[in-house]
Amino acid sequence: MFGKNKQKMRRTYDELLLEDINRAKQSWDNKRETQQSIYGIGEEIDAEVEFEKAKYQLLFREARRRKIKGKLQASVIKINEL
């Protein structure tokens, strides 16, 4: 009775956080690929890559703080193995 709504809400927001982490990782990877493929890159692209990286790291730290477990993307596993 008590706390069931809180647990349900926590699970819902944890799932949303995992989805946000996946989107941020995909966006960061996309920006990095763009940065690598363009010759003579500008400061704007560098700033976008750094922004996406910071956004991903912030979300990832929040998930670790909450001790959320979920699926890892293959790209995350590959980076952590290196």
Image: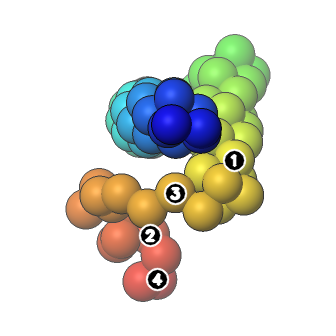
Residue at the image point whose x is 44% and y is 69% from the top: 79
The answer to whether residue 67 is visible is: yes
Question: Quick one: label 2, few (<14), some, or many (20+) residues within 10 Å?
Answer: few
Helix or strand or loop: what does disc 3 sit on? loop
N-terminal of the pair, mark 1 or mark 2, is 1
What amino acid is labelled 3 in the image?
A: Ile
Q: Position of residue 27 (x, y in %)?
A: 43, 29
Mark 3 → mark 2, Cα distance in angstroms: 19 Å
Mark 1 and mark 2: span between their CA atoms?
19 Å
Q: Secondary structure at mark 2?
A: helix
Callouts 2 and 4 close, C-beta under 8 Å: yes
Q: Is residue 49 above or below residue 42?
A: below
Q: Is residue 45 above or below residue 36?
A: above
Between 22 and 49, the one lying in front of the other is 22
Q: Counting residues from the N terminus, which is met first, the one under dot 3 or under dot 1?
A: 1
Left or right relative to 23: residue 1 = right
Indicate the amino acid at tag 2: Ile
- Residue 77 placement (x, y as % from top left): 35, 71
* 82 is higher (above) or lower (below) than 15: below
- Label 1, label 4: how far apart the Cα atoms are: 23 Å
Q: Secondary structure at mark 1?
A: helix
Q: Which residue is mark 4?
A: 82
Q: CA distance from mark 2 to mark 4?
A: 5 Å
Quarter of the image where one finds residue 18: top left
The answer to whether one can see residue 75 in this image is: no
**First of labels 4, 3 by sequence position:** 3
User: Disc number at residue 79?
Assistant: 2
Of residues 26 and 60, the one nearer the viewer is 60
Residue, x 42% and y 83% (percent of image)?
Answer: 81
Q: Residue at x 59, y 38 (%)?
A: 2
Residue 68 is marked as 3
